[in-house]
Amino acid sequence: EEAAAAAEEAAAFDPIDHIVFAVGSGGTAAGLALGSHLAGLRPQLHGVAVHHSPEHFYELIDAEVSELSGGSFEACAREMLAIYPGAGAGYGVATPELMAFCAETARQSGVLLDHTYSGKALYYFAQAARAQPERFRGKHILFWHTGGAPAPQKRKVAPLPRTAASHRCLA
């Protein structure tokens, strides 16, 4: 009875077309890929690798899904999700553009993004979505915020490029 009520309630919502999330260790990506497959859900999964290459995570996710399924599921991560490069200036290193994006997102939405995981995931996915607007226009996109707290006093910011003007002393 409770399950039927939950299914009825879920049917009242529009389906989610895309799920976007940070890929740090590969655990969230493997869980979402396997869970979506087993549940018969078909949103397109988009992970943003905040360190390492997408290839590294495809291989890791294939191994994790195989292990989670007890070897009964032959994984092919490339068929279950797309992984975008998102390391930027390096793991845990934020560019001024990324920091501005995180600040503007917080100002406009109240959603706090850290510069290591969720902030990078949304920043780099937004770039990919802007490059292919027809793919995402009118779609229901869920951004899976995996946590992470902004820590401005601890952040590593990529240095600004040096210009001739930056070497002048101000008197």
Image (cartoon, rainbow, N blue to C red):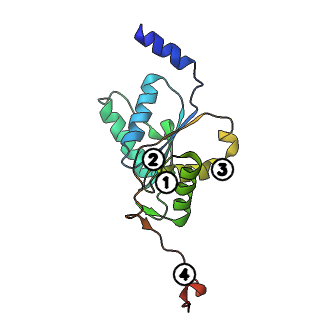
Query: Could you tell me the amino acid type at mark 1?
Result: Lys
Nearer to us of marks 4 and 3 is 4
> Horizontal and vertical percent for residue 118?
46, 49
Residue 101 placement: quadrant: bottom right
Lower position in the chain sequence, tag 4 or tag 1: 1
Lower position in the chain sequence, tag 2 or tag 1: 2
What residue is drawn where x is 38% and y is 45%? Answer: 26
> Horizontal and vertical percent for residue 27?
36, 41
Q: Badge 3, how many Cα within 10 Å: few under 14, some, many 20+?
A: few
- As displayed, is residue 111 above or below residue 8? below
Query: Could you tell me the amino acid type at mark 2?
Result: Ala
What residue is drawn where x is 33% and y is 39%? Answer: 64
Check contact, mark 4 vs mark 1: CB within 8 A: no
> Horizontal and vertical percent for residue 48?
49, 49
- Residue holding disc 3: 130
What residue is drawn where x is 53% and y is 51%? Answer: 106
Q: Badge 4, how many Cα within 10 Å: few under 14, some, many 20+?
A: few
Residue 91 seen from this side: no
Seen as rendered, the residue at the extreme front is 171
- Residue holding disc 1: 120
- Residue holding disc 2: 22
Q: Secondary structure at mark 3?
A: helix
Query: Could you tell me the amino acid type at mark 3?
Result: Arg
> Horizontal and vertical percent for residue 152?
42, 62
Relative to 131, 156 lies left or right: left
Query: Could you tell me the amino acid type at mark 4?
Result: Arg
Check contact, mark 4 vs mark 2: CB within 8 A: no
Point out the image quarter for the C terminus. Answer: bottom right
Lower position in the chain sequence, tag 4 or tag 3: 3
What residue is drawn where x is 46% and y is 16%? Answer: 6
Lower position in the chain sequence, tag 4 or tag 2: 2
- Real-space Cα distance between discs 4 and 3? 29 Å
